[in-house]
Structure formats: structure tokens, C-alpha cells
Image (cartoon, rainbow, N blue to C red):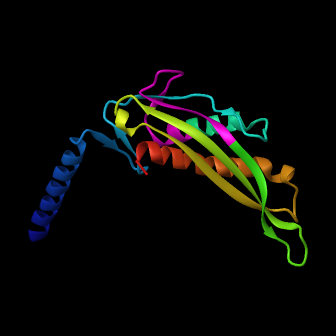
């Protein structure tokens, strides 16, 4: 009998806790993000590539990666313009630099692909959460085994994943 009363007490406490969280005006999800109450739509505008080195498909792949991140980690509907939240910006950096030098030579044993994206996030529901910020991520690769051309698509995909996670967290988790 004591076990049943303890279970009831636990479930009643849990129910009160969930009701309290629900009434705070913020929707919480299992992805770690919080989306303001009343936010229903998001616009992800095309990110133009303004980097000194232009990889031809980077703008499209980054824009699509950001749309997919928002789609998979929120319940927001995507609209072409004038969403409750708007992501816009441009790719400002794309570089390949040596990350480690091979012993006994002046050749790079490890190279680094870096991508920088300048993002303007407009939150039309809670304007104080809006921001403009640059995000940079990189991935190292071996120059001994492959040329950059053989790895570039995969590296870009990995970097886009990291960048979009950073941007999503900054917009919806205030990190």
C-alpha cells in the first residue's frame, strides 16, 4: 500500500512540474532548444558566398543544411519570407591552411579547411533574442593520403553540420 501512495505522490509531483514548465511561455523540446511561445514560422534566406575562395556549391549546401537543422530539431514551419524567425547572412571565409608540418620537411602533413559564416538572426516574437554573429568551424585532413578534391565534399558536409548546430543553439538555446 505504501508503494502505491509513493507512486501516486511521484506522478502527482511530476504532473505539477510539467504543468509549471508548460505555463512559462516557452516551448521546450528534447533537442535542448527552446522556442518562444507563439513562434510558428521560420525563414532561412539564401547564404551568398562572399569568401575570397569560392567553392561552387557551398552556398546551396550550407543554406540547405541550415534549413534541415531547423526542420529536424524544431516544429517550426518554413516559409520563404517574413517568418517569425529569420536567418540570413553570407559565407565570408573559406580557406585551406597547413595545420601540422611533416617532420624533417617543410611540407604540410595535415591541412585544415575552415569555413566562416556571418549570420543575422531576427526574432520577431522576442526581438531581444536577435543577433548578428560570425561562426567559424574547421576540419583537419591528411594531405599525404588524398588531395583536397577527394575529400572536400565530405569535409564541407561535416563543417556545415557543426556550423548549423552552433547557429541553431545560439538562436534557440541562447548559447
> Which residue does the image show at 67% across and 55% down from the upper left?
138
Q: Which residues are magenta?
A: 68-92
Residue 142: percent from left, percent from top: 81, 64
The vertical placement of 20 against 80, above or below, is below
> Which residue does the image show at 39% across and 28% down from the upper left?
124
Q: Quadrant of residue 112?
A: bottom right
Which quadrant holds the N terminus?
bottom left
Which residue is nearer to you in this view: 100 or 22?
100
Does residue 53 appear left or right of residue 6 in this picture? right
The vertical placement of 46 against 154, above or below, is above
The vertical placement of 103 against 80, above or below, is below
Q: Residue furthest top?
A: 81
> Which residue does the image show at 13% across and 64% down from the upper left?
4
> Which residue does the image show at 59% across and 33% down from the upper left?
89
Does residue 174 appear left or right of residue 115 in this picture? left
Which residue is nearer to you in this view: 66 or 20?
66
Q: Say whether residue 65 is magenta.
A: no
Amino acid at each position: 500500500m505504501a508503494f502505491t501512495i509513493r507512486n501516486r505522490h511521484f506522478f502527482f509531483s511530476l504532473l505539477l512540474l510539467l504543468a509549471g514548465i508548460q505555463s512559462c511561455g516557452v516551448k521546450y523540446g528534447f533537442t535542448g532548444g527552446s522556442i518562444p511561445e507563439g513562434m510558428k514560422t521560420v525563414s532561412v534566406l539564401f547564404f551568398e558566398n562572399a569568401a575570397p575562395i569560392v567553392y561552387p556549391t557551398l552556398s546551396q549546401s550550407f543554406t540547405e543544411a541550415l534549413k534541415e537543422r531547423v526542420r529536424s530539431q524544431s516544429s517550426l514551419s518554413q516559409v520563404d519570407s517574413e517568418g517569425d524567425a529569420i536567418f540570413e547572412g553570407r559565407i565570408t571565409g573559406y580557406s585551406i591552411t597547413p595545420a601540422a608540418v611533416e617532420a624533417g620537411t617543410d611540407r604540410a602533413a595535415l591541412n585544415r579547411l575552415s569555413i566562416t559564416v556571418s549570420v543575422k538572426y531576427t526574432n520577431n516574437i522576442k526581438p531581444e533574442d536577435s543577433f548578428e554573429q560570425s561562426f567559424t568551424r574547421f576540419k583537419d585532413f591528411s594531405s599525404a593520403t588524398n588531395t583536397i578534391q577527394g575529400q572536400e565534399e565530405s569535409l564541407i558536409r561535416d563543417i556545415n553540420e557543426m556550423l548549423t548546430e552552433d547557429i541553431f543553439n545560439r538562436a534557440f538555446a541562447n548559447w
